[in-house]
Structures are given as C-alpha cells and as structure tokens.
Amino acid sequence: MSKVLGIDFGTVRVGLAITDSARIIASPLETIPNKGALLYLKQLIEKEKIEDIVVGEAKYLNGESSEITALQLEFVQKLSAQNERVRIHRVNEMYTSKMASQAMIASGAKQSARRDKGNLDMISAAILLQSWLDYHRP
C-alpha cells in the first residue's frame, strides 16, 4: 500500500506528516517554508510514491471559510495540477493546533520546543492525517 501525506498549510510554513506503508500511523515529518513548497512536495511525492494527500481546510465554528481558506484552495489547485495521479482530500483542521500544543505538553516537551511554530505545524499535520486515517479505516 502507498503512504499518505498530510499537509498543514500556512502562509509562512507548511507542516508535513506521513503514514507508514500500511497506512496505520501518521507521524510528523518536517516543516518547510511556504516559498518553494510545491517544488519540494513534487519531489517528495515521487520519492515516497504518495497516492493520497490530506490537506487541512480552515473553517470558522459556523462552517464559513476563514481568511486563509482561499490561499489553501489556490495551493491545493496548484498541487493537484502538478501531481495529476494523486488524490487530494480536504479535512477540517479546526482545533488541530490546540490539540498539537496539548500533545506536546503531555509528552513533556520543553517550553522552547513548544514555542517553535514549526514543531506545532508538523504535529498538527500528523493529527489531521491520523484523523483522516481513522475515519477511513475499514
């Protein structure tokens, strides 16, 4: 089975997570700068033979799109255009950053590590990806 890539898109950084080959566990991978992310992702998708990508979708509590939603959609469209064989799934990312912060506290991460937004972004991507995996588990 192919791996699945999780993406927590941000205007400055993009958090990445990836599954194991059996698609059971999502693990934080890394955080990359937004600038140049599409080229980097194209190479990663080819290297890891990714067939599915889960991308966070920012929504308000009332279900309306947030300010970043249009930028996320533009990113997804470009990602899809350059990787035509890959299926892209959108998932509501509400509370993933809060959950990532709580997970870091629970794991005993030092305050300096918790302040690093890059750590938060890749953990958020892993939470987003794991929730998608759990929902789609047979």
Image (tube, helix red, strand yellow):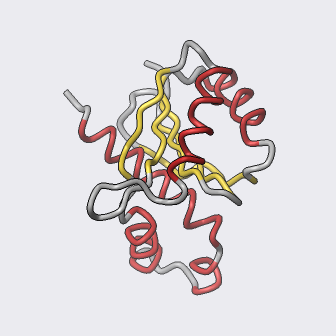
Name the outermost residue toward the top. Answer: 85
- Quarter holding the N terminus? top left
Q: Relative to 125, does residue 42 appear above or below in the rendering?
A: above
Q: Relative to 31, does residue 104 appear above or below in the rendering?
A: below
Horizontal and vertical percent position of residue 72? 56, 45
Q: Say which of 26 and 40 sits in front.
A: 40
Q: Residue at x 26, y 41 (%)?
A: 134
Horizontal and vertical percent position of residue 32? 72, 52
Q: Say which of 8 and 16 sits in front.
A: 8
Name the outermost residue toward the bottom. Answer: 111
Q: Residue at x 52, y 36 (%)?
A: 5
Q: Residue at x 41, y 44 (%)?
A: 129
Horizontal and vertical percent position of residue 38? 72, 35
Quadrant of the rendered image containing residue 10: bottom right
Q: Is residue 37 left or right of residue 53?
A: right
Q: Residue at x 40, y 50 (%)?
A: 128
Q: Relative to 111, does residue 25 appear above or below in the rendering?
A: above
Q: Is residue 46 left or right of residue 136?
A: right
- Quarter holding the C terminus? top left
Q: Relative to 59, does residue 105 appear above or below in the rendering?
A: below
Name the outermost residue toward the left. Answer: 138
Tag count = 0
